[in-house]
Image (spheres, rainbow, N blue to C red):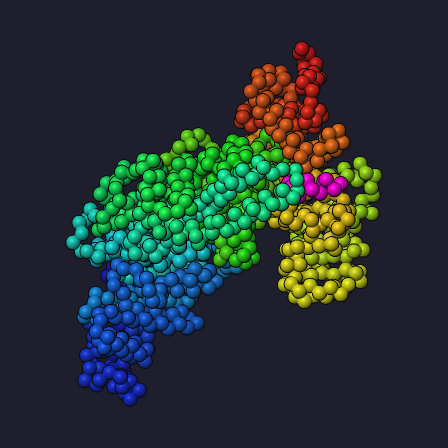
């Protein structure tokens, strides 16, 4: 087999020198007895047609044996005979051959038309070969369309796909292959095309295509998302579209691109997919218009539109609206918009209604039975009123309205000048140039509402479609029309949230959708801080449950964070990333896309064709601050560095919890969150005169986690049960603390516990266990269910319950009775919530009413935010050079003495703030008899309210007072190192004002309580003014 010299400036043409002999062997086989189906007088004609007239690329004959070709000729001939007997013009050819080294697929298709029935070979190739390719096991593909038709009565030609396993040269970067499987950035950054390419590609590719691919690979490795290149091939007149991206960063992309150019009446003569050992994939398509008489201007416009929408499809290659799109009933952008709206409606359609609001006014918020009824009704309404399937059915039944809704959205957020013009029909009206379009001018909102009422037959249908209008109206900015992007992001005005469910409106709300996930970010102040949480799902049922509660959980977490952040200048925020069920192995890919797409909305685009200026209805500079949370602790360095690469001037403060090489203070390394939580345990022991060593404890969240491991290390109690991701560990006599400590130091789950250390009454049940017999003879049928519900089990009874992990609302008003005996005695005497939202408020109130001393998450779990805030303060106060010398791990691996001392300062601040709040809560509870979980909120609201009031006063303008307060509020170590003047000069004024207000407000409320006298603040400020000599 040989290949000719190049003709197309890219790949050498496939010219098979042995084709004549190959044809002869195939002909002889067909004349043999084993191949007697074709009449002998027709064999030569059929073979000659197949080899020469059909116009198959020689690559087919170079790779297939005469026996295989003979079978393919027989199959096609048989299909022709079948069609003739049925007297119809529809010919079907589907040939597939798969091996360990790859696959060959051949089918007939009409150029420029996507298949809607029969095998979808490109989807199969995506799923089985391209989507799963990694540097250690990758597949390349070549595909060719025959030049001749396969049947005289149709325009159908043969499309052949050749998939083969890549053979990469030995590379020094091969050790990175394992890491590349879960990360779009973990693979090598090599761009040496000869070192990272498959040997077949190197043999066929010209210097020109190697140089092009090398340039594209370099760009892919320097950014997040696809790199798209478009040019023309002078010798053939074809348009070459090349898309380069990181392996496993999107799915079903080859088939999605085919549907895209088919939609715009283009077809491809050949396609290539190349893989590289540094983790990059390149798709190369050669496109031609179906109508060769189309004007040059029309072809140019359309091919550019295809290029632009290739980026949109990278974000969401497939959606439930795919069939409508393939049938040309909606456009690419309408399909994506429909999907976004569908997801939005799932979370925000009004599921409770006015009747529920009336019921809440009739029932008592303090009666547990009433709260239980309301809770059950709320869950039932959310689960059953609008299912995902029902919503999708409504939307797909009203495609005409969907098109009008999209046009309304585009008229607001598309910044181009061609909206409504004939050339933009494919972009905005959704029909392409050959079909009648919707009106080019968007309708007024009232007119759209009238159409919705007129075209719908039920109130549910109207409500769902009107929710799209709600979405359009409240989007302040979006990257939907950004030329390059990795996920779709939307900054929303949160005023659309119903008061009955969300009484306090967030300051800012971001909504993000990617191929692997959906997510939100909620914040309650302009300057706010909170962690980003990855949410995984074990199965379909768990995923649907997580999906239904995603925004509620995000809102509640951010609200809790707002109350937690009362001691620091930043308000509360939280981000959530729910992984799709088929993307549970791609947390970092999802996190990358989440961060990058949000940065699209925070940074002004300044690169035409890549990142352009967006339509911004918000109109103000906006900065978000991210921190670590469940599943993202190891991603903070990347996010900060990525913000720096994107040109964000706030990159140093963008994330907290970074590694020490970047000046971060890792929460888990120094037990920052646990230091706050444990102060509440120590406070209870102190107030009640208890000995910690004599107290029993249940802990959820095991030795592998941040809170769980540090709680084990810092405590001295008799832990009788630990629940973590791997299962349940119980010993009524107390779990061996040395063995627990070993796991905590190694960050291992209880599945690694040495069970020989258990007493005869102890046991361990793992989530994968079945039919386990406990020491008392009880049989556990299913380890997973046992783990999930163990916190409600009577075996979990202990003096203390310290949840350090677990899903939100694990204990609510509906199940709290399961941890209360028939005599009305709770399983626990004292609860300190380390995990966020483990209890619902109504469940807390019921337990406190029964005498449980309960300290909620917003009070106990605030050490991490204090650490993060002081980490940022150091980054803002120190110059880049000072920060590198004083706060970053040095080249020899050592930590500066300043850093060590600063960490101690942070730990002291955390413990001090926790003690002050504990004492205030205990004192206020004894004075007012109010539940501590209510007082916790009262305390937070009082501090936040006072902060807001102080910002409206002239106190900040009193320079001597300002300097005095800042000298007390700022860390002593920073003051000693830099001096007050330098800090005041370097740190942004709005941040300093927030420190000023937070210090005064929190210390005042901790000292005087939630209901101070009208003269209390004067008394509080008097010592400061006396110190200044001011009256």
Q: Residue furthest bottom?
A: 33
Out of 1025 and 390, give the one closest to the viewer. 390
Out of 429 and 374, give the one closest to the viewer. 374
Residue 940 is drawn in which quadrant? top right
Residue 885 is drawn in which quadrant? top right
Q: Can see residue 670?
A: no
Instruction: Determine the main secondary structure of the stretch shown in magenta.
Output: helix
Q: Which quarter of the rendered picture does the C terminus lie within? A: top right
| Residue ID at (42%, 50%) | 391
| Residue ID at (66%, 30%) | 939
| Residue ID at (45%, 61%) | 132
| Residue ID at (41%, 40%) | 471
Relative height, residue 626 to residue 101 (above, below):
above
Number of marks in the rendered image: 0
Left/right of residue 527 with respect to residue 764 in the rendered view: left
Out of 844 and 521, give the one closest to the viewer. 844
Residue 573: horizontal and vertical position, in percent? 55, 37
Relative height, residue 808 to residue 537 (above, below):
above
Residue 513: horizontal and vertical position, in percent? 45, 47
Left/right of residue 637 with respect to residue 398 in the rendered view: right
Residue 735: horizontal and vertical position, in percent? 77, 55
Out of 512 and 546, give the one closest to the viewer. 546
Residue 375: horizontal and vertical position, in percent? 59, 45
Magenta-drawn segment: 840-852
Q: Can see residue 318?
A: yes
């Amino acid at each position: 087999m040989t290949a000719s010299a190049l003709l197309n400036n890219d790949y050498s043409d496939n010219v098979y020198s042995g084709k004549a002999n190959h044809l002869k062997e195939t002909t002889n086989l067909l004349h043999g007895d084993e191949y007697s189906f074709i009449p002998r007088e027709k064999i030569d004609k059929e073979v000659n047609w197949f080899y020469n007239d059909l116009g198959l690329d020689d690559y087919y004959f170079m790779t297939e044996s005469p026996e295989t070709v003979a079978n393919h000729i027989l199959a096609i001939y048989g299909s022709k005979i079948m069609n003739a007997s049925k007297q119809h013009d529809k010919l079907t050819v589907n040939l597939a051959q798969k091996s360990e080294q790859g696959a060959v697929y051949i089918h007939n298709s009409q150029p420029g038309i996507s298949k809607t029935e029969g095998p979808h070979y490109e989807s199969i190739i995506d799923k089985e070969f391209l989507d799963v390719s990694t540097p250690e096991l990758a597949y390349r593909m070549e595909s060719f369309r025959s030049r001749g038709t396969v049947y005289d009565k149709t325009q159908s030609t043969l499309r052949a796909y050749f998939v083969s396993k890549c053979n990469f040269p030995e590379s020094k970067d091969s050790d990175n292959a394992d890491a590349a499987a879960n990360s779009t950035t973990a693979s090598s950054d090599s761009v040496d095309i000869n070192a990272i390419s498959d040997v077949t590609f190197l043999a066929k590719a010209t210097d020109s295509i190697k140089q092009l691919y090398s340039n594209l690979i370099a760009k892919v490795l320097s950014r997040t998302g696809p790199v798209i290149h478009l040019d023309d091939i002078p010798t053939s007149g074809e348009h070459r579209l090349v898309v380069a991206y990181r392996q496993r960063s999107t799915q079903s992309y080859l088939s999605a691109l085919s549907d895209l150019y088919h939609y715009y009446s283009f077809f491809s003569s050949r396609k290539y997919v190349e893989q590289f050992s540094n983790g990059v994939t390149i798709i190369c398509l050669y496109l031609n218009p179906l109508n060769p008489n189309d004007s040059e201007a029309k072809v140019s416009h359309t091919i550019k539109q295809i290029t632009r929408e290739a980026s949109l499809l990278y974000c969401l290659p497939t959606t439930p609206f795919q069939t409508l799109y393939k049938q040309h009933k909606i456009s690419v952008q309408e399909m994506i918009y429909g999907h976004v709206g569908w997801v939005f409606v799932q979370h925000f359609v009004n599921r409770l209604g006015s009747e529920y609001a009336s019921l809440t006014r009739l029932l008592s918020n303090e009666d547990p039975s009433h709260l239980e009824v309301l809770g059950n009704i709320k869950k039932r309404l959310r689960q059953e009123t609008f299912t995902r399937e029902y919503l999708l059915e409504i939307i797909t039944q009203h495609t005409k309205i969907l098109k009008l809704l999209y046009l309304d959205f585009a008229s607001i957020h598309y910044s181009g000048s061609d909206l409504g013009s004939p050339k933009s029909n494919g972009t905005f009206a959704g029909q392409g140039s050959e079909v009648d379009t919707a009106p080019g001018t968007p309708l007024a909102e009232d007119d759209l509402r009238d159409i919705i009422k007129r075209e719908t037959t039920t109130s549910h249908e109207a409500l769902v479609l009107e929710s799209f209008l709600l979405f359009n109206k409240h989007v302040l900015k979006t990257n939907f029309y950004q030329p390059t992007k990795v996920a779709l992001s939307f900054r929303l005005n949160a005023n659309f949230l119903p008061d009955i469910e969300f009484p306090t409106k967030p300051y800012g709300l971001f909504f993000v959708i990617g191929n692997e996930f959906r997510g939100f970010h909620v914040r309650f102040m302009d300057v706010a801080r909170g962690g980003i949480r990855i949410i995984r799902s074990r199965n379909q049922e768990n995923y649907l449950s997580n999906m239904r509660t995603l925004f509620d959980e995000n809102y509640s977490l951010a609200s809790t964070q707002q109350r937690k952040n009362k001691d620091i200048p930043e308000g509360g925020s939280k981000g959530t990333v729910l992984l799709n069920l088929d993307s549970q192995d791609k947390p970092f890919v999802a996190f990358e896309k989440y961060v990058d797409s949000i940065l699209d909305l925070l940074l002004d685009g300044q690169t035409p064709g890549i990142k352009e200026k967006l339509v911004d209805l918000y109109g103000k500079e906006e900065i978000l601050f991210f921190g670590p949370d469940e599943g993202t602790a190891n991603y903070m360095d990347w996010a900060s560095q990525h913000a720096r690469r994107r040109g964000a001037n706030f990159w140093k403060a963008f994330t907290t919890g970074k590694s020490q090489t970047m000046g971060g203070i890792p929460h888990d390394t120094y037990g920052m969150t646990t230091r706050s939580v444990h102060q509440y345990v120590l406070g209870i022991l102190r107030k009640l005169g208890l000995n910690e060593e004599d107290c029993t404890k249940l802990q959820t969240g095991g030795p592998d986690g941040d809170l769980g491991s540090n709680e084990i290390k810092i405590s001295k109690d008799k832990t009788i049960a630990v629940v973590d991701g791997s299962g349940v560990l119980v010993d009524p006599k107390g779990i061996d603390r040395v063995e627990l400590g070993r796991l905590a130091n190694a960050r291992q789950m209880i599945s690694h516990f040495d069970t020989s250390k258990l007493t005869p009454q102890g046991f361990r049940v793992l989530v994968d266990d079945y039919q386990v017999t406990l020491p008392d003879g009880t049989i556990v049928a299913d380890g997973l269910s046992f783990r999930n519900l163990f916190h409600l089990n009577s075996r979990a009874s202990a003096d203390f319950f310290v949840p350090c992990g677990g899903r939100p609302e694990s204990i609510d008003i509906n199940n709290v009775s399961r941890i209360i005996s028939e005599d009305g005695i709770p399983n626990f005497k004292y609860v300190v919530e380390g995990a966020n939202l483990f209890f619902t408020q109504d469940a807390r109130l019921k337990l406190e009413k029964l005498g449980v001393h309960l300290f909620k998450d917003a009070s106990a779990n605030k050490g991490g935010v204090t650490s993060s805030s002081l980490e940022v303060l150091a980054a803002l106060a120190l110059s880049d050079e000072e920060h590198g010398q004083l706060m970053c791990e040095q080249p020899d691996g050592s930590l500066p003495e300043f850093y060590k001392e600063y960490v101690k300062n942070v730990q002291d601040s955390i413990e001090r703030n926790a003690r002050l709040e504990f004492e205030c809560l205990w004192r206020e509870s004894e004075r007012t008899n109010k539940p501590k979980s209510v007082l916790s909120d009262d305390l937070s609201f009082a501090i936040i309210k006072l902060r807001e009031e102080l910002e409206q006063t002239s106190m900040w303008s009193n320079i001597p007072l300002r300097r005095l307060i800042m000298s007390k509020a700022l860390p002593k170590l920073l003051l000693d190192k830099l001096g007050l003047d330098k800090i005041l000069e370097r740190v942004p004024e709005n941040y300093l004002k927030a420190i000023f207000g937070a210090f005064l407000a929190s210390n005042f409320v901790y000292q005087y309580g939630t209901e101070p006298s009208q003269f209390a603040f004067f008394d509080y400020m008097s010592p400061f003014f006396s110190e200044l000599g001011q009256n």
